[in-house]
Image (tube, rainbow, N blue to C red):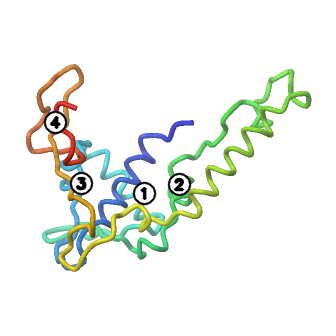
């Protein structure tokens, strides 16, 4: 099973908003997130609007505008976010009786096995809050006991150099840019 890019980016937007230090006055902007993750600004705009429509983000237009979590990160469950982005959790044909053409239906344990696996997957996500994914912060705003992440420029496919030096990707400070 693979999550869609929509769900991946939705989770990134929410995590980015949740990770902002409490003392920061300015809201997060779509441009800021797009540059940090090397994602198209126009694509993120659609995702942000969807998250706002589902009550996860508050958006403000104009100068000084941006986005903030509408609810505390402790109340946002990953299972809910994944269900918003993954509108089709039909892992195999036999999960959907309207399209099922499998001749093994009723004689095969695949549907039940994959169903249990999907239920277990979603149960873990339902038990995990957005706040659980964000490193605890010290009083200075730095992650407590965790080395800070450094932003590295994203790489173009097949290239050793950065695609855009102003955009960044998150990396462990213990790894080199060549890794």
Circle 1 SS class = helix
On residue 177, which mark appears?
4
Q: Which mark's residue is nearer the viewer, 3 or 1?
A: 3
Question: From what the image shows, is residue 61 above or below residue 152?
Answer: below
* Horizontal relation, residue 3 to residue 102: left or right: left
Circles 1 and 4, Cβ within 8 Å, touching? The answer is no
Pointer 1: residues within 10 angstroms few (<14), some, or many (20+)?
some
Q: How many circles with numbers are drawn on the protein?
A: 4
Pointer 3: residues within 10 angstroms few (<14), some, or many (20+)?
many
- Say which quadrant the N terminus sits in: top right
Circles 3 and 2, Cβ within 8 Å, touching? The answer is no
Circle 2 SS class = helix
Which residue is tagged 1? 50
Pointer 2: residues within 10 angstroms few (<14), some, or many (20+)?
some
Pointer 4: residues within 10 angstroms few (<14), some, or many (20+)?
some
Q: How far separated are the C-alphas under marks 1 and 2?
A: 9 Å
Viewer-closest of 43 and 142: 142
Label whose residue precedes the other's in the sequence (1 or 4): 1
On residue 155, which mark appears?
none
Q: How far separated are the C-alphas under marks 4 and 2?
A: 34 Å
Q: Which mark's residue is nearer the viewer, 1 or 4?
A: 4
Circles 1 and 2, Cβ within 8 Å, touching? The answer is yes
Residue 172 horizontal/vertical position (percent): 24, 47
Question: From what the image shows, is residue 136 above or below residue 114?
Answer: below
Label whose residue precedes the other's in the sequence (4 or 3): 3
Return the residue found at the far left: 165
Q: Which mark's residue is nearer the viewer, 4 or 3?
A: 4
Which residue is tagged 3? 33
Which residue is tagged 2? 84
Viewer-closest of 167 and 50: 167
Q: How far separated are the C-alphas under marks 3 and 2?
A: 20 Å
Residue at image point 17% right, 22% down: 159
């Amino acid at each position: 099973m693979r999550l869609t890019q929509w769900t991946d980016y939705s989770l990134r937007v929410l995590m980015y908003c949740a990770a902002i230090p409490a003392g920061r006055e300015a809201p997060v902007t779509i441009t800021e997130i797009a540059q940090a993750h090397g994602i198209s600004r126009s694509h993120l705009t659609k995702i942000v609007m969807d998250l706002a429509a589902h009550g996860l983000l508050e958006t403000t237009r104009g100068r000084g505008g941006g986005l903030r979590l509408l609810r505390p990160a402790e109340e946002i469950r990953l299972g809910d976010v994944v269900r918003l982005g993954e509108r089709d959790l039909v892992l195999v044909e036999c999960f959907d009786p309207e399209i099922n053409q499998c001749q093994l239906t009723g004689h095969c344990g695949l549907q039940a096995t994959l169903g249990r696996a999907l239920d277990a997957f979603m149960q873990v996500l339902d038990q995990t809050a957005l706040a659980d994914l964000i490193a605890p912060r010290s009083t200075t705003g730095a992650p407590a006991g965790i080395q800070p992440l450094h932003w590295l420029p994203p790489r173009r496919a097949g290239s050793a150099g950065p695609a855009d030096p102003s955009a960044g990707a998150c990396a462990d400070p213990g790894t080199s840019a060549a890794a």
